[in-house]
Amino acid sequence: MPYQTGLAMLANTATIILVLLGLFFFVAGTVGLLRFPDLHSRLHALTKADNLGLGLVTLGLAFQMDDAWSVAKLVLIWLLAVLAAATVAQLVARAALSRLPGADGRGDEP
Amino acid sequence: MMAFFYLAAVVLLLTVAASLWRIYLGPTRADRMMSAQLIGTSGVGIMLLLAAAQGNEAILDAALILALLAAFAAVAFVKSSSADGAGDREEEDD
């Protein structure tokens, strides 16, 4: 372990805690996707939890970036992901509710 | 720190594997689309972790593109769910 200044150690600690929290939310969302009984609860579990997880991972990694531009790019990626997930969750839920076969959970396989 | 980032990336790879399992199970097309969405989000997370582990800023650009493509894929799915490709239920409700 090389010598670390106090500030670098603080940044590393913050990174580890935030990334671990983010991974927890990723895993929680994935377990929800696998275990929940019907489409709309799976949709609910997935679209909230994993984007919160991505946000926490992003926040944790922001402590490791060298310059402000990289941090800005990280924030941009997260904003795009959140915006897309919020829109897509509504669209997919509506499409599944109205039109797609098998929205009652029986499946659309022949 | 580098080993920690790689370990975190492996955990995210496991969530990708889990969503592949959900794609296999189905049962509806919307389930499979949401799994693809999770693969997109996890893939972005993996790329961010790799960028931090390797100190390579270019991976951030690739992550940005992946986030954009995941959103486009879901929008294309919703549009394909109606015959005319509009994908908007409210247009035809009257």
Image (cartoon, rainbow, N blue to C red):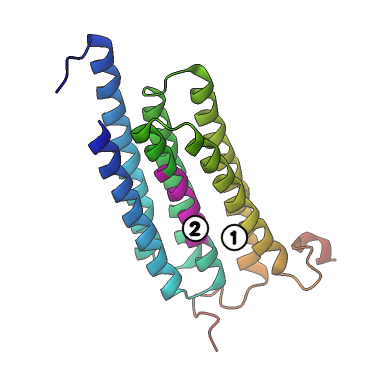
Q: Residue furthest right?
A: B94
Residue A37 showing in the rendered view: no
Identify which amino acid the numbered label 1 is placed on.
Ala
Check residue B36 for magenta coloring: yes
Which label belongs to residue A93?
1
Q: Nearer the viewer, residue B23 or A37?
A: B23
- Identity, as a three-letter code, of the amino acid under mark 2: Leu
Which chain is indicated by disc 2?
A
Q: Which residue sits at x=56%, y=77%?
A: A102
Seen from this angle, which residue lies furthest bottom? Answer: A110
Residue A43's disc is: 2
Residue A109: x and y, percent? Answer: 53, 84
Protein chain holding label 1:
A
- Comparing A88 with A8, the one in front is A8
How many circles with numbers are drawn on the protein?
A: 2
The picture places residue B5, in percent across and down from the top left corner, at: 30, 38
User: Which residues make up the magenta segment?
Assistant: B34-46
Which callout, 2 or 1, points at the residue further toward the start of the chain? 2
As drawn, the residue found furthest toward the left would be A1
Q: Is residue A21 left or right of residue B59?
A: left
Residue A73 falls in image quadrant = top right
Residue found at x 67% / y 72%? A99
Number of other residues with Cα within 10 Å of mark 1, as a class: few under 14, some 14 to 19, many 20 or more: some
| The magenta stretch spans residue B75 | no
Q: Are marks 2 and 1 on the same chain?
A: yes
Near-viewer residue (B61 or A80): B61
